[in-house]
Amino acid sequence: MAKISAGIATSHVPAIGAAIDLGKTGEPYWQPLFKGFEFSKQWMRDNTPDVIFLVYNDHATAFSLELIPTFAIGCAASFAPADEGWGPRPVPTVQGHAELASHIAQSVIQSDFDLTIVNKMEVDHGLTVPLSLLFGQPKAWPCRVIPFAVNVVQFPPPSGHRCYQLGKAIRRAVESFDEKLNVQIWGTGGMSHQLQGPRAGLINKEFDRRFMDRLISQPDALSQLPHIDYIRDAGSEGIELVMWLIMRGALNAEVKPVHRFYHVPASNTAVGHLILENLS
Ligand code: DHB
Ligand code: FE
């Protein structure tokens, strides 16, 4: 039986990927941010899973405005890093887990969640930056990764409640896979940020801290937060946080927070990070 052992939340920002790729992590601007991930990199070495189910959002890279799946599961054998304008990041190609991904697709779709199945896709900073933050710069990623893309770029995004319930369905799917696998689920993106319009640069530390508190101990209530509250309080790109609720829905009601980190700013974004162990 496959099991979900832990959930990880982390923000993504393209500039973080560039700082890693260009060897700037020790510079004064970046040093405090990367310090917050030192514990996590060691924890990942000690707790490397077989598979990461990585919930992230594509930024009009794999999916243009011509085709906008709300939820898309990567069932391919591998996923190459995308060219987002400066050439593909110099990071390893992601090795998928087609069997587990296909099993999750059939289980979740048959439990009434409509997923788009993706058999060929390149992955952008939404997926590669979290991997770099947690694994550094290895020659190959140390485990398989199933990319799970959520539309939070083009209105309407899915509700937090839908995401939270989907997490529960993903957990049932993983636990009905007939092979002993250690699976982690990651929820990425956020925290508060707005990249455009008159409110560009918006950060809301109070909202972010409360979101982390409630994600840990009151996820049911947090899942009821309407989408307009994310936009108003956490900025237009703060809506990326609904992806953290997919991760949280796939864990037990009680979790053990083993690491928590919050840092402002990284580029235009408030960076939040959690490691939640799933107590059995
Ligand atoms: C930034 C943040 C994002 O979430 C993103 O997708 C692109 C840029 C930023 O802060 O620069
Ligand atoms: Fe983003």
Image (cartoon, grey):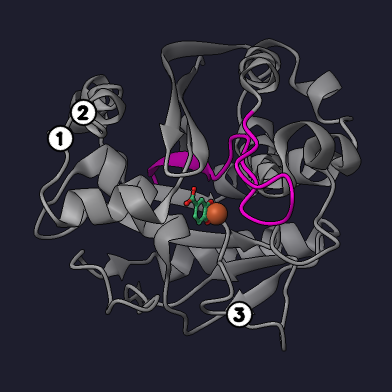
- Tell me if 157 is positioned left or right of 47 in this view: right
- Magenta stretch: includes residue 197: yes
Q: Earlier in the sequence, mark 3 or mark 2?
A: 2
Q: CA distance from mark 3 to mark 2?
A: 33 Å
Badge 1: residue crowd in 10 Å (few <14, some 14–19, many ≥20): few
The location of residue 249, given as percent across then percent down, is 69, 33
Residue that appears at 59% across and 62% down: 149
Q: Are discs 1 and 2 less than 8 Å apart at CB?
A: yes
Mark 2, secondary structure of its residue: helix
The mark found on residue 27 in the picture is 1
Up the image or down, 207 lies above or below 125; here it is above
Mark 1, secondary structure of its residue: loop
Spot the residue most to the bottom. 66
In which quarter of the view is residue 214 placed? Answer: top right
Q: Decide which of 49, 31 is in the foreground and name it.
A: 31
Up the image or down, 99 lies above or below 5; here it is below
The reply to whether residue 178 is in sight is: no
Q: Which residues are magenta?
A: 179-203
Residue type at tag 3: Phe
Q: Earlier in the sequence, mark 1 or mark 3?
A: 1
Residue type at tag 2: Gln
In which quarter of the view is residue 73 placed? Answer: bottom right
Q: Which residue position holds label 2?
A: 31
Up the image or down, 226 lies above or below 207; here it is below
Mark 3, secondary structure of its residue: loop
- Tell me if 96 is positioned left or right of 100 in this view: left
Residue that appears at 60% across and 28% down: 251
Badge 3: residue crowd in 10 Å (few <14, some 14–19, many ≥20): some
The mark found on residue 63 in the picture is 3
Spot the residue most to the front. 198
Q: CA distance from mark 1 to mark 2?
A: 6 Å
The mark found on residue 96 in the picture is none
